[in-house]
Amino acid sequence: MFSGKGGVGKTSVAAATGLELARRGNRTLVLSVDPAHSLADAFDLDQSLFSAATGLPYSIQKRLAIQEVNIQQEIRRHWQEIWSYIASVLRTTGVGQVEAEELAIIPGMEEVSSLMYINQYHRSGEYDVVVVDCAPTAESLRFVSMPNTLEWYMKNIFHIQRTVMKAVRPVANRVAPVKLPSDSYFGNIKKLFERLEGIGELLEDSRVTTVRLVTNPEKMVLRETQRAFVYFALHGMTVDGIVVNRVLPEEVHDRYFRDWQRSQQKTIAQIQEYFDPVPVARVPLFTQEVLGADRLAELARCLYQDPDIDPAARGRNEAPYRFEKSGSGYRVRLRLPFTAPGEVGVFKKGDDLVVEVGTLRRHVGLPTTMAALEPGKAKLEEGILTIELMENRP
């Protein structure tokens, strides 16, 4: 997965990586999950031909395909029952039909559809590598948190809601201004969830899935890259590479760019210090826009210079958290670099240990032997949060 702040060039880097993987003999798919798709533009494709693919994989070369998830097509394939009901409710409030159909595309539909495709391709083995071109950081975090959110809903709310609806629907539909959703609505939700089964574990398995953060050598972009690193760690994912894009080449000696070069060099030094031991790769600023297969191939040569290093090989394989025995209790260790102690909150909810960093939460599911324990002391040292779990004695 390639993620980063909007505009840093992650689509170009993802496309170039897919091109290089295919050149080395891998059956490769580059999948765009950014609602503002630009993957076809990166390959400079004829839009009239590409649009005929209607959101399905489109072959670029013998071993390379690209896919931009088309939400309108996904509604017809998977969301029809849910979308139709939401649109009908909106129409009863006085919203026009066209507006209701647009508003019925609720946040999360596109992310869930993309996750279903990833799960499908993993199960079928149709591709050796799937390169995911993510949306900007905030949307990427919603994308990776979606499996946990849906699992919580299915586990705690879905069955109760469906049972209650069955009981009250006959009476409520006679008096309510809006009809309650039919049972087929809930059946649609269940089918969607079944198609997502196992995707959470797949995303968190660093043997299969890793994240590469694309950034620019600028202070403002670096700060968001740091935040993204923390948040992906909170969601149980492994960041195994940083790509610093659009670095001014050393051979540029123009006085106009002198201060830019100094600033970039300072930021790159900070990046290497902050993310060590995560590998950091550099991509120069090209003299022309990176557009089309030839220029993407040039970018790939800069990014993957060593022919002996597989672009799909993991640069890092570190679990985001681990459990340890400690006397009569246990410890949970969670890596939280770039975080200050005052930003962290820890509490227990059910069988989950909940860690808060700012406004984001991470639910760490506890093993059976630890589920009855309560968090005691918590200590943040050198980017590692250690939480003591012990019996809650009166």
Image (cartoon, rainbow, N blue to C red):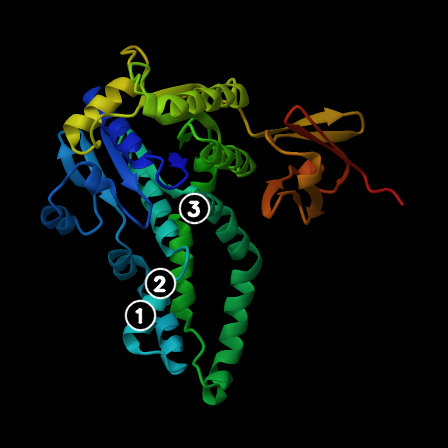
Q: Work out which quarter of the rendered image holds the N terminus and state it.
A: top left
Q: Amino acid at mark 2?
A: Ile
Residue at 39% x, 25% y is: 260
- Secondary structure of residue under mark 1: helix
Above or below 359: residue 250: above
In which image quadrant can residue 160 be found?
bottom right
- Give the residue number, with chain letter if any, for mark 1: 101
CA gap between label 2 and label 1 equals: 7 Å
- Secondary structure of residue under mark 3: helix
Indicate the position of residue 177 as horizontal and vertical percent values. Answer: 45, 86
Tag 3: Cα neighbours inside 10 Å, few (<14), some, or many (≥20)? some
Residue at 26% x, 36% y is: 30
Indicate the position of residue 93 as horizontal and vertical percent values. Answer: 41, 81
Q: Earlier in the sequence, mark 1 or mark 3?
A: 1
Q: Is residue 239 left or right of residue 253?
A: right
Which disc, if any, is residue 143?
3
Q: Amino acid at mark 1?
A: Glu
- Give the residue number, with chain letter if any, for mark 2: 105
CA gap between label 1 and label 3 equals: 23 Å
